[in-house]
Amino acid sequence: MIFSFLCFTLFLMMVLSVYFIVPVKLRYGWLLLASYVFCLTYGRQSFYILLCSTVVSYLFGLLLDKVKCLYPERKKTLVCLWCGIIFCVIPLLFGKIKQSSLFVSIGTSFYLLQQIGYLTDIYKGKSQAERNLIHYALFVAFFPKLVSGPIERSGNFLKQINDVHLKTFCYEEARSGFQLMLWGYFQKVIIADSLAVYVTNVYDHWEGYAGGTIGLASIVYAFQLYADFEGYTNIALGAAQTLGIHLRGNFKQPYLSDSIREFWKRWHISFSSWLKDYIYIPLGGSKKGTIRHYTNLIITFLISGLWHGSGLNFVAWGMLHGAFQVAENICLKFREKLKVKALENKSVWKNLIKRIAVFILVDFAWIFFRASGLKTAMKMVYKICFDFSISKIGGDLAFSLHLTVIQILMGALGIALLLAVDLMHEKNVSVRRMVDEKPIIVRWICYLSIVLILSLAGMARWGGEASNFIYMQF
């Protein structure tokens, strides 16, 4: 797994050592070569699909520009756009929905959305086709974001690599990037992987556990998924920053949201904003009446579920979030009609209750996301509702799951640390800025301590085998 701590860090150091030495004209060619080597570590098939989709979408981008100039009428340009989108989507359809091994490739779901967005932006006149094939290929294949995003916009990325100021080494950028990477690996290796021991055991053998144990595992999974996915995102953002490139963020304290709508503005931001701009708004958004508005919400979240997988459990997960959004809109309109001032009061306790309620709804939906199938998810929910026993949780932790006190404490402290950091960020308190203000000796003691902990944890596996990042499967 090249995204593991030691392998990826060594790979990045090699890329950096050459990147700022070679002539400026060769740097993005070097980055593209490094990205293709990175892709090849996941198999030649992944590389061939990446290469083919890059060439096809690049040519369709040029064709769209040409058609727009020659034929101002919208219809012919739209046909060209749809042809390009269909060619882009073919690997995704056969790999995910048709389950064809011929089209199974790492990162396909992420970079294909980038290509669709790129072609759509050209069609809408928001950007022009990129003439430089190396620059465009790097936009698609840039190795920090290749495996699991963030889903980058062409305007943001291509503008940066054409900026001469980003072609010189910046110590502050590199230091900040490595700090972010260390935190990302800490989230993954120390927090997410330690929580995975409990979650995996319960979800794989749920029939033998009481509802309370399953319910606790579902809560723990919410934080495991968050630490795992945000950990990956922070590694990707940090690695890109060391190279002077800033990628879009993916998370903004999502479990502190006080509504489902706000949750989706804070969770997997690059994907949720992509759905909004390229699915929800083109469908009509909220501009064509209430029924159409609610239908558009359901369709958007149904597509979100299908993007994650073709199983009925993912469809149910997407539909649940669509239903939550519809219900939230109905309640908001009802409250506005009644003009209930008590509900508008933003006291600390009412905000806390709202945040807990949103977390419960989101966590309920995560059961369908994590379960092996729809029937399994339904049975687990039934157990949580009708076979709930707090007294059995302790016995399951100690005897059935064979968890030690250290493992339980590590999991609890990991969750507490995630919440503490998010609360600080919510108050605009930067942890990295606090570290930067410390004397250099203190800073390096912190860095080396985290590196040592990560290395030891990687060898010990914290009670289990090393795991891939969860979103690599999507």
Image: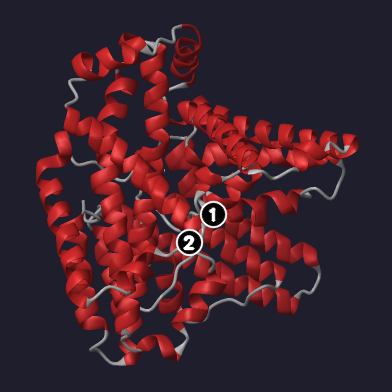
Q: Residue furthest right?
A: 337
| Residue 37 vertical position relative to residue 390 in the rendered view, above or below | below
Q: Quadrant of residue 96?
A: top left
| Residue 346 vertical position relative to residue 161 in the rendered view, above or below | above
Dot 2 crowding, Cα within 10 Å, few <14, some 14–19, many 20+? many
Point 65% across, 38% down: residue: 350
Left or right of 138: which side holds 155?
right
Residue 372 appears in the figure: no
Q: Quadrant of residue 466?
A: top left
Identified by mark 1, the residue type is Ile
User: Considering the numbered disc 1 on the image, is that residue within a helix, a strand or a loop?
Assistant: helix
Q: State how many labels appear.
A: 2
Point 23% across, 89% down: residue: 21
Marks 2 and 1 close (CB-CB < 8 Å): yes
Left or right of 377: which side holds 67?
right
Q: Position of residue 78 (x, y in %)?
A: 72, 61
Identified by mark 2, the residue type is Gly
User: Considering the numbered disc 2 on the image, is that residue within a helix, a strand or a loop?
Assistant: loop
Indicate the quadrant containing the C terminus: top left, top right, bottom left or bottom right.
Answer: top left
Q: Which residue is mark 1?
A: 269
Q: Residue furthest top?
A: 386
Q: Earlier in the sequence, mark 2 or mark 1?
A: 2
Residue 376 appears in the figure: yes
